Image (cartoon, rainbow, N blue to C red):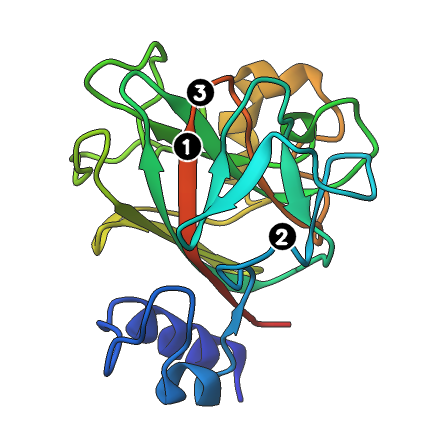
Amino acid sequence: MHRRMLLAVVVCFAMTPRLGAAEPNSLTPEEQKAGWKLLFDGRTTDGWRNFKRRDVSPGWKVEDGTLVRATNGAGDIMTAEQFGGFELVLEYKISPGGNSGLMFHVTEEADTPWKTGPEVQILDNAAGHDANKAGWLYQLYVPENDATKPAGEWNEIRLLVAPEQGATWVNGVKYYDFVKGSDDWDARVAKSKFAKMPLFGKATKGHICLQDHGNPVAFRNIRIRPLD
């Protein structure tokens, strides 16, 4: 399939509600046929590990079908597998005043994940202590609206990353488009704190990473469709 046609199909699917919505942490037959796979089975932390570790720290727990950053010192966790182009969907529930993040194309060349992988912010917009709000591509891309639900409620992030197109949706509302490595991207990076980080955003393949920013946060329905 021609790349432009492929991306059109991806974007169209991204804006389509789940057909015959399955139980949490499961896939509908339509999703399975389309190439989606679960990154979290709702029961274990299989397929995940802490940054620069082989296992998952006790600070991350599976509770009632959710992956929870429960205690201090949990650390950032990431998928064991690496992905290049993909469409990713997850749901998060942030604590009051809480902060977390979803990073992609993370490598282990630097001392923290955010020095290589761009981050979609996760935040309690009402009481969180960060100028970058939920759904923003940290210090790079800002939406014109806010579709988030309050702390304590489930929010959905949908992230598309492909060589010629990228986009982010929150609760079904499109926030912004981006093309990683484009002139526009590079110009925004040059004006951000990441300008001093030579490895930031350079990898075209890497881990999906969930951030421990010191606050409780829960995740579920983490699923991905590789586009390589």
Q: How many marks?
A: 3
Under mark 2, the amino acid is: Thr
Question: Is residue 118 found left or right of 48 in the rendered image?
Answer: left
Report helix, strand or loop for mark 2.
loop
Quarter of the figure with the C terminus: bottom right
Image height check: is 34 above or below 140?
below
Image height check: is 31 above or below 145?
below
- Write down the residue under mark 1: 217
Q: Residues within 10 Å of mark 3 (few under 14, many from 20)?
A: some
Question: Looking at the image, which residue is at 49% across and 27% down?
Answer: 188
Marks 2 and 3: in contact by CB < 8 Å?
Answer: no
Report helix, strand or loop for mark 3.
loop
Looking at marks 1 and 2 on the same chain, the residue that comes earlier in the sequence is marked by: 2
Q: Which mark is residue 215?
A: 3
- Write down the residue under mark 2: 45
Residue furthest to the front: 64
Question: Looking at the image, which residue is at 74% across and 35% down?
Answer: 51
Question: Looking at the image, which residue is at 36% across and 33% down?
Answer: 136
Looking at marks 3 and 2 on the same chain, the residue that comes earlier in the sequence is marked by: 2
Which of the 4 quarters of the picture holds residue 202? top right
Under mark 1, the amino acid is: Val
Q: Residues within 10 Å of mark 1 (few under 14, many from 20)?
A: many
Which of the 4 quarters of the picture holds residue 143? top left
Question: Is residue 167 found left or right of 199 in the rendered image?
Answer: left
Under mark 3, the amino acid is: Asn
Give percent across and percent down for residue 212: 55, 26
Report helix, strand or loop for mark 1.
strand
Question: Is residue 106 found left or right of 103 in the rendered image?
Answer: right
